[in-house]
Amino acid sequence: MTTLQNDLLLRTIKGEQTDRFPVWLMRQAGRILPEYRAVRASLSGFKELVETPELAAEVTIQPVDILGVDAAIIFSDILVIPDAMGLPYQMIKGKGPWFENTIQSKEDVQRVTEKIDVADKLSYVFEAIKITKKELNGRVPLIGFCGAPWTIFCYMTEGEGSKTFSKARRMLYQDPELSHELLHQITEVTIEYLRHQIAAGADLVQVFDSWSGVLGPDQYSEFGMKYVRRICDAINDVPVTVFAKGAYYAREELAGLNCQTIGLDWNMDVAESRKLIGPDKTLQGNLDPCVLYADFKTIEQKTKNMLNSFGNQRHIANLGHGVYPDTDPEKVKCFIETVKEFAKN
Ligand code: CP3
């Protein structure tokens, strides 16, 4: 095994004292770099890129070379899970993901609860991780990831993006038992998926619960957190980060998870979050991605304010959600450089 040259992220997660905060950005691979668009333009679409390991590895490493981040995140998508379970998606330009078939009935759930061979169906992801690890050659750690079961459930039942995910939430009320059956199955497949990512070389994993904010505390506890907890309990050999966007109401409960890091979005007050979560977890976040549309001076100032608000405690600098696609890479570099130059006191 290659030893990591830059293990700042992993040391911060363990709670060790470091000279500076590690920094990376959610959605740093793809989206913003012209170098990514050049690779993407030579292909039929997003899916082809995700399913071609050599190219997925190439765009995974681009932000490390170009932006100087302290971690790489494997280029893939959370939607490879529904795809592997028998619900293929298409990525439609200007619209986002779209599923021809969705889950509406007991029969639909039965169809996706048949056992699948994760190693085979998602081999392109594991291959991409292996190639990336080899090409990174220990420069920075590699983050593996998955969608949280609730967020995957949202796409499988709704079939596309939505502001309210009311079809997904309707199912929780109309057939809670069937909802649990589907969530259980997504969880089982996801655990296996993460284990294979780790075996292929992922140094840590992040669980994205992008749509926890559409649920209230009771429902999140029953249909969301329950399954995130199972994932955390099942993954013990690498650190786990849980990012439950909009789940400000669940921060105390999140603190009880068997994970090392909790992601904060920009709506969450940092001091209040630290108080609710306690000193034993590393916090990740949480600059408003829109700050990167401001001028360089403002970006520097807002980044420093954000770092100061976390104090000298376990903190991974990041945005409060993924970087927006039309962000100027120079502005992203300004954010990263500001974090790197910020002296810890
Ligand atoms: O972080 C990274 O850079 C690694 C790659 C990554 C992608 N998607 C690539 C991608 C990761 C970690 C994701 C996670 C993801 N995908 C989430 C959770 C994080 C979040 O943002 O809340 C969600 C909800 C999805 C589902 C998804 N994929 C949507 C809604 C869309 C369309 C809008 C968008 O985000 O661009 C995608 C497409 C997608 N996934 C792109 C990329 C680079 C853009 C596709 C393109 O190049 O045309």
Image (cartoon, rainbow, N blue to C red):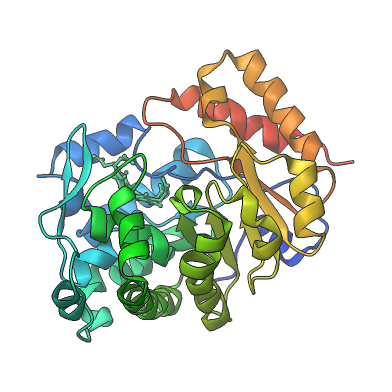
**In the image, what residue occupies the spot 9% across and 44% down?**
44
Check the image and report above or below for 43 versus 196: above
In the image, residue 82 lies at what x, y percent?
Answer: 24, 65
Check the image and report above or below for 237 versus 169: below
In the image, residue 62 lies at what x, y percent?
Answer: 40, 44
Query: Splitting the image into 4 quarters, where does residue 118 fall?
Result: bottom left
Among all residues in the image, which is located at the extreme bottom? 115
Query: Splitting the image into 4 quarters, where does residue 35 fall?
Result: top left
Among all residues in the image, which is located at the extreme right? 345
Return the residue nearer the eye: 300 or 84: 84
**In the image, what residue occupies the spot 26% across and 34% down?**
37
Kindly tell me whether residue 157 is visible in this rendering: yes
Return the residue nearer the eye: 22 or 314: 314
Q: How many marks?
A: 0
Kindly tell me whether residue 76 is visible in this rendering: no
Return the residue nearer the eye: 268 or 204: 268
Check the image and report above or below for 262 versus 93: below
**In the image, what residue occupies the spot 48% across and 53% down?**
215
Return the residue nearer the eye: 218 or 182: 218
Would you say 157 lies left or right of 280 here?
Answer: left
Would you say 329 lies left or right of 23 here?
Answer: left
Would you say 300 lies left or right of 213 here?
Answer: right
**In the image, what residue occupies the spot 63% across and 57% down?**
250
Query: Splitting the image into 4 quarters, where does residue 337 fall?
Result: top right
Check the image and report above or below for 247 versus 41: below
In the image, residue 145 lies at what x, y percent?
Answer: 43, 62
In the image, residue 224 lies at what x, y percent?
Answer: 48, 65
Q: Quadrant of the C terminus?
A: top right
